[in-house]
Amino acid sequence: MSDTTRRTFLKQAGLATAATSLWTARSYAAIPGANDRVRTAIVGCGDRMRQALIPSFLQRSKQMNFEFVAVCDIWNKRRDDGVAFVQKKMGGGTLEAVRNTDELYARKDVDAVLVATADFQHAHHGTEAVQHGRDAYVEKPTAHTMADARMFRDAVHKSSQIVQVGTQRRSTPSYQRAYEYIHSGEFGDIVAVEMTWNVNQPGRWRRPDVVPLLHEQDTDWKRYLINQPFEPFDARKYLEFRLFWPYSSGIPDQWLVHQIDTVHWFTGYPHPRSVVANGGIYAWHDGRRNWDTLTAVFDYGPLDDPSKGFQVIYSSRQTNEAGGVKEIYRSVGGSLDMDKQLVSSEGGLTAKYAGEMHMQPLLLKDFNLGNPEKVSNDANTGADPQTSANMQNWMECVRSRKTPNASIDAGYSHSVALCMCIAAMQTGAKVTFDDKTQQVVAGGKHVA
């Protein structure tokens, strides 16, 4: 890429990013009915809702003419605390405390919902919302079983509702610039992707101070289970669900889907061709069911041409934070480091080794795609910029009725990769996907 071409690309990418991220009152006021306030309810008022979605919503709500009208949660403490939390953030106002979604959707004053319930519940609550004619922002993962993924996708397709999935990289300007750069052809074919998500946190996803506060009579355990096999009430599985299958798969549900989603976005491939995985609970033996360490290898490429493609090597551990969170794309000419937003010649074909085969060297010129967005929260609202951008895009699309950045089809694709990874973890087999039946295959059998 010449200096002139690179400057042109960065200028165009900057303009495109600005166009997707700016939305003024004049813009949406021109849409028929856009001046009507969008009355929004919270479904599930746990940590993710309080720490990210509510602050991001309130950061944009006045500009976009959205308002909170209700908090729905089946645990009475979380429901009442949620109302108080939102009122404090808003500086006052009236919100209704609603016991469950049956009561919520019987109301006439709810146009849209934010959903941040347990991982296994997302597809059910998203499906429920659109079937009741409500637009929805639904946290990731979209689903960790194929039956739930198909149910949610089909419900959205049959409706006219706007659904945004909580994979916020798709609304993040730096990732949008990377997408444009890869699609410009300047990077070359992707030959490998390396992804890590490492922490050293024995308390990650634990809630030891909150678990004793939850009593069965204060919630609705059967409603919590939805379509899962019945088991006796367990406050840990309710509040620390990320540690316990089938309520979550842990690392894949929480972290893998964010990163693997960018592979689908950048390449256009709908799902991996195959997945293998290994790992286990190696350090934090605290009663959890889900692994604290995972390594998975995903094979991507054209489904009809195995001679083309690349591997995604995904590694995550909760036992040592070295390496942190990384997403590095490789081509024959170099690398794209999404953490640094840096294109470089690292690993590219040098003159020495190219010359041995009478080839030309191929080395990308080093340049920065733009300053990476800091995920630190806004001092005034507590909103992180990535979630805030995704929330704004959803609000814009509720107004315009356009397809949002993180659509249900993007959510379905990450669900396929997620279900394949879970099957590989649970069976030890090389897992593939049957496009005809839309089912995961392990050991020659359909398993999800």
Image (cartoon, helix red, strand yellow):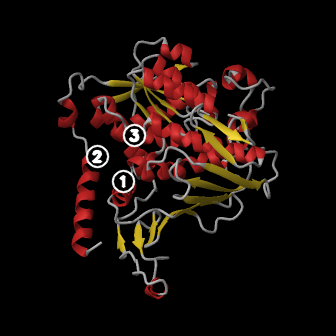
The image's mark for residue 176 is: 1
Label 2 crowding class (10 Å Cα cut-off): few <14, some 14-19, many 20+?
some
Whether tag 2 and tag 1 are in contact, CB under 8 A, the answer is yes
Name the residue type under label 1: Gln
| 123 displayed left or right of 12 | right
Q: Quadrant of residue 74?
A: top right
Relative to 258, does residue 42 appear above or below in the rendering? above
Q: CA distance from mark 2 to mark 1?
A: 9 Å
User: Which residue is pictured at 46% across the width and 16% down the height?
Assistant: 132
Q: How many marks?
A: 3
Mark 2 or 3: the one toward you: 2
Mark 3 or 1: the one toward you: 1
- Return the residue nearer the eye: 275 or 80: 275
Residue at which label 3 appears: 391
Residue 350 at x, y percent in the picture: 45, 83
Residue at which label 2 appears: 20
Label 1 crowding class (10 Å Cα cut-off): few <14, some 14-19, many 20+?
some
Which sits earlier in the primary sequence, circle 2 or circle 3? 2
Q: Quadrant of the N terminus?
A: bottom left
Residue 408 at x, y percent in the picture: 46, 34
Is residue 113 among what the camera can see?
yes
Is residue 80 among what the camera can see?
no
Q: CA distance from mark 2 to mark 3?
A: 12 Å
- Return the residue nearer the eye: 54 or 127: 127
- SS class of the residue under badge 1? helix
Name the residue type under label 2: Thr
User: Which residue is pictured at 46% across the width and 36% down the height?
Assistant: 409
